[in-house]
Amino acid sequence: MQIRFFTRYNNNNKLDTIYVRIYQGKDFDLTVKTGIVVSKNEFSLPKQKMKDKAKTKNRLLINNKLDALKTHLRNCYNETVMVDNHFSKDWLKIRVHAFFNYIPSSENFKKYFVDWAKHYNKHEAINKDTGMPLAKGTLKKYNTSLNCLIAFEVHIKKKLLLNGITYEFYKSFTNYCLEEKKYTRNTTGAHIKTVKLWLGEANKRGFCNVDFSDFKSMTNETMDVYLTTRELDKIYKHDFSENPRLANVRDLLIIGCYTALRVSDFMRLRITDIANNTIEISTKKTEKTVLIPLHKYIKEIIKRNDGNLPRSISDQKFNKYVKEVCEEAGIDEIVEGEKFDNTTKRKSHGFFPKHELITSHTCRRSFVSNLYGKIDNTTIMAVTGHKSEKEFFKYLKTTPKEHIKKLNEYWGNQDSKKIENE
């Protein structure tokens, strides 16, 4: 096997383009241009390098690059011989392009970070557990991070290379999110998490080799609220007979809080999904089938609705009307939390009447928080569909005071049993 370099006239007669040829008898003979352009007649064919008196800039660098390419092709040749001994017509082209990191414009996603993120979100983002397309909410998060990355490129006035992503990028991007965009640590951490996902997938495909082990997805403990069983009793028993719209939303809220279903699931719940006082439904996000026993309030709701479930409404309307339901039911304790600000289009932290903080996400948090410590976590997770306790505990919103209360009650029960035994 032989590897040789030679030149051909460029379109401009004052320049030559260096080509590489690899051949082995009658087995194969392949030629492709390297992309390196030099001044005319400054490349020595006998010596296979730039002439000593060449005026072309970076003469020594070109010589070193050609030597490295020769070694690269020799290694590729040996690898091919040992694998399948197949030298296709594009064999040399593919390997030379890989060596020079040359990517055609149609495949910029293999080279540039933003292009890869766009490509991944559009063509390769799937649920790794089901093999199905991602839920709209998850894809929306990815695209939000993509828009942030695009804005960051505009900010630094530079196009990011996949192989150019370093810890310096992480620090700069994090600072941009926190200082320039004024994002919270949680929002910034969510963007970093998506960045790490993209880089991990790019590494797997061989588009880059980036170490992002020090990229930390920062978080702050969120100030989300939940509805206690006492508050849910108060809401359920409140008379909404004068307002059928709020009565319907109240019933939807109760179903959400006593099933742990996401709003996308309890809004599409049908009476045919219920048999033997048990709900059986395949969740929209994870496509996992869950079994949920009917709470007495849900049974009463179905009976009151002549054997039917409440009328479904849009997520947006639910999040708007559920605040009215809780306000009218007197859920007005002043609590610490975060509320979306329509002016800044971001969440603002402060102290608000509790009803102002209630959303569809409150349902799953309420289910978990109200049952935690009363039954085992495995049973609760079987209903919520959580695969790990780490994710499960994110939904747990009981306060330290509530933990103390539960511990005191437990010790009180233990003392009572001790006295009875004596």
Image (cartoon, rainbow, N blue to C red):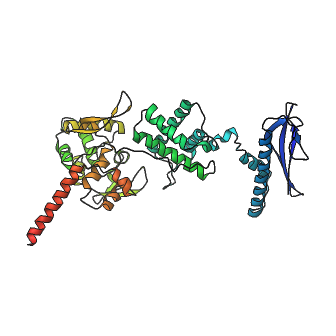
Q: Going by the image, does 407 lie left or right of 67?
A: left
Quarter of the image where the N terminus is located: bottom right
Q: Between residues 143 and 211, which one lies in front from this camera angle?
A: 211
Question: Residue 86's quadrant in the figure?
Answer: bottom right
Q: Going by the image, does 269 lie left or right of 72?
A: left
314 w.r.t. 299: above or below: above
Q: Between residues 330 and 166, which one lies in front from this camera angle?
A: 166
Kindly identify the residue that appears in the image at 87 percent across and 44 percent down: 6
Kindly tell me whether residue 281 is visible in this rendering.
Answer: no
Residue 375 place in picture, x, y as percent: 26, 61
Q: Residue furthest right?
A: 46
Kindly identify the residue that appears in the image at 36 percent across and 57 percent down: 389
Q: Residue furthest top?
A: 343
60 w.r.t. 416: above or below: above
Residue 8 place in picture, x, y as percent: 87, 39
Quarter of the image where the C terminus is located: bottom left
Kindly identify the residue that appears in the image at 25 percent across and 35 percent down: 352
Q: Between residues 28 and 281, which one lies in front from this camera angle?
A: 28
Residue 339 place in picture, x, y as percent: 32, 35
